[in-house]
Image (tube, rainbow, N blue to C red):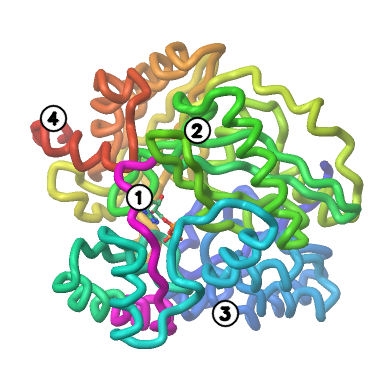
């Protein structure tokens, strides 16, 4: 688009590829994210020194922080994302559920907002019917979630969930939902402009998760029928409209075996797995985000969005799947990324790069696509075999084993898949 870029970085990230590829880069502080990437004041100062027009917050850190969006707005720097009001509304999961429910979108049965006391909570859990899931109002990243199967385990898990939520999010408030057994996680990509046009760009099936964190995402979902896709797409648009949404966002649903779908949350930012949708639709989501932030109208309609490919993303983490996914930071010796037809790698790593121990363990995303699911999966298997990262442990061998697993190949994976897969697979396969 001919736009110049300025990257901000912490001292630990001086070697990172984004710093080297940006037109300019400014260091905003120390290794810990609390001293750098979470310091809105320093980011805004860097933006003012360099006189930038807009900030893209990426994912993680301040990307879903309404105060940061507000600060950008008040400093006349365009925040490339939704209005702070929408972030606030959808950031509180209890408010988000209430908002979309009023718009007629199905939600998981549960408490009306946060539960006030343990005795209230038990009554609500009994009324909903066990099993239930206790979730942090401020939750994210799969943390602060506990499952209870009866009154006894509820009493215990309720306190554990509150403690975890307080520690992770500084907010101990929790709410209760019916625990859906073996659901699929299916989410819809939304794109909305500031002139009232709201479109969906299809779904991503993110059922392959470990500890409620996504490992593999694909589109289209092997489970959805055209009819269900249509219904859920409409519901996703309604939910985004209820949040007065603009820019890119995601509406997440759980879908049970019968095809009942329930809204669980909205992510008010671009997501890790957005390349899957880009490869299926041919639409550059980041470019569209910049256009929308600039006040431009989306120059296509729902009918123009074509789903012509199948795409699958594997998250490459610096973790050792043979040792219970222990983090594996360190220096990468040789780094070789696969290529060829239908293969895309998004990564900040390279030969000789040292992975700092301070941040997320994800070091790359491998996205493979083709005309059918079979082609995409075969390409993913081939590309994983050619992805060389020496010197540290990664999730590459695990992904290769999943690509060859009959249950996954048949498109039968639910959110219970990983536990089952790990239980029946020898972990020495993964080293
Ligand atoms: P987070 O914001 O922490 O990512 P989500 O609400 O998006 O939390 O849920 C993450 C995952 O947790 C879901 O994809 C699903 O696997 C599981 N989960 C959440 N709510 C429920 C529920 N009511 N029943 C069953 N599984 C759930």
The Cα–Cα distance between marks 3 and 2, rounded to whole angstroms, is 30 Å
Task: Say whether residue 27 is visible.
Answer: no
Which of the two discs, 2 and 1, labels the residue nearer the N terminus?
Answer: 1
User: Which disc, if any, is residue 180?
Assistant: 1
Quadrant where the C terminus sits is top left
Which residue is at a point 20% across and 78% down the rendered structure image?
A: 155
The Cα–Cα distance between marks 4 and 3, rounded to whole angstroms, is 42 Å
- Report x, y in % for residue 134: 34, 68
Tag in front: 1 or 3: 1
Residue that mark 4 sits on? 429
Could you say which quadrant of the image residue 295 lies in?
A: bottom right
Q: Nearer the viewer, residue 252 or 402?
A: 252
Q: Does the magenta run of residues contain 170?
A: yes
Which of the two discs, 1 and 3, labels the residue nearer the N terminus?
Answer: 3
The Cα–Cα distance between marks 1 and 3, rounded to whole angstroms, is 38 Å
Label 4 crowd (10 A; few <14 / some 14-19 / many >=20): few
Query: Height in image: 216 above or below 91?
Result: above
Which of the two discs, 4 and 3, labels the residue nearer the N terminus?
Answer: 3
Residue that mark 2 sits on? 345
The Cα–Cα distance between marks 2 and 1, rounded to whole angstroms, is 34 Å
Q: Quadrant of ligand 1?
A: bottom left
The Cα–Cα distance between marks 2 and 4, rounded to whole angstroms, is 24 Å
Residue that mark 3 sits on? 39
How many numbered marks does the figure carry? 4
Tag in front: 1 or 4: 1
Which of the two discs, 2 and 4, labels the residue nearer the N terminus?
Answer: 2
- Which stretch appears magenta? 162-183
Tag in front: 4 or 3: 4
Disc 3 residue lies near ligand 1 with CB under 8 A: no
Could you tell me which secondary element the residue under label 4 belongs to?
helix
Tag in front: 2 or 4: 4
- Report x, y in % for residue 309: 59, 19
């Amino acid at each position: 688009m001919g736009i110049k870029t300025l990257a901000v970085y912490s001292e630990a990230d001086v070697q990172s590829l984004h710093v080297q590829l940006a037109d300019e880069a400014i260091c905003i502080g120390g290794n810990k994210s609390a001293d750098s990437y979470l310091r809105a004041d320093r980011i805004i100062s860097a933006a003012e020194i360099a006189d930038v027009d807009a900030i893209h917050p990426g994912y993680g850190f301040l990307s879903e922080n309404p105060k940061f969006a507000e600060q950008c707005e008040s400093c006349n720097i365009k925040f490339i994302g939704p209005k702070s009001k929408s972030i606030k509304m959808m950031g509180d999961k209890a408010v988000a559920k209430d908002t979309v429910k009023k718009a007629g979108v199905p939600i998981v049965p549960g408490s009306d907002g946060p539960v006030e006391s343990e005795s209230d909570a038990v009554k609500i859990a009994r009324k909903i019917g066990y099993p239930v899931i206790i979730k942090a109002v401020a939750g994210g990243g799969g943390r602060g979630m506990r499952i209870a199967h009866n009154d006894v385990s509820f009493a215990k898990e309720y306190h554990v969930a509150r403690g975890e939520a307080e520690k992770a999010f500084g907010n101990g408030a929790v709410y209760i939902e019916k625990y859906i057994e073996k659901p699929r996680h299916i989410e819809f990509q939304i794109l909305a402009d500031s002139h009232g046009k709201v479109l969906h760009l299809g779904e991503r099936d993110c059922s392959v998760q470990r500890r409620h964190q996504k490992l593999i995402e694909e589109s289209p979902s092997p489970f959805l029928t055209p009819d269900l896709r249509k219904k859920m797409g409409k519901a996703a648009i309604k939910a985004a409209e209820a949040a007065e949404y603009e820019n890119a966002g995601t509406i997440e649903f759980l879908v049970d075996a019968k095809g009942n779908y329930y809204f669980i949350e909205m992510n008010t930012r671009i997501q890790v797995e957005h390349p899957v949708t880009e490869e299926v639709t041919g639409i550059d989501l980041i470019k569209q985000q910049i256009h929308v932030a600039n006040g431009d109208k989306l120059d296509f309609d729902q009918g123009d969005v074509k789903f012509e490919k199948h795409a699958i993303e594997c998250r490459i983490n610096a973790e050792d799947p043979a040792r219970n996914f222990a983090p594996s930071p360190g220096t990468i010796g040789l780094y070789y990324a696969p290529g060829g037809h239908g293969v895309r790698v998004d990564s900040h790593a390279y030969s000789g790069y040292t992975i700092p121990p301070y941040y997320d363990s994800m070091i790359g995303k491998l996205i493979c696509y083709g005309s059918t699911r079979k082609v995409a999966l075969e390409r993913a298997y081939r590309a994983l075999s050619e992805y060389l990262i020496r010197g540290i442990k990664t999730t590459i061998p695990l992904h290769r084993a999943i690509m060859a697993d009959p249950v996954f190949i048949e498109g039968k994976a639910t959110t219970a898949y990983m536990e089952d897969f790990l239980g029946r697979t020898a972990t020495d396969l993964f080293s």
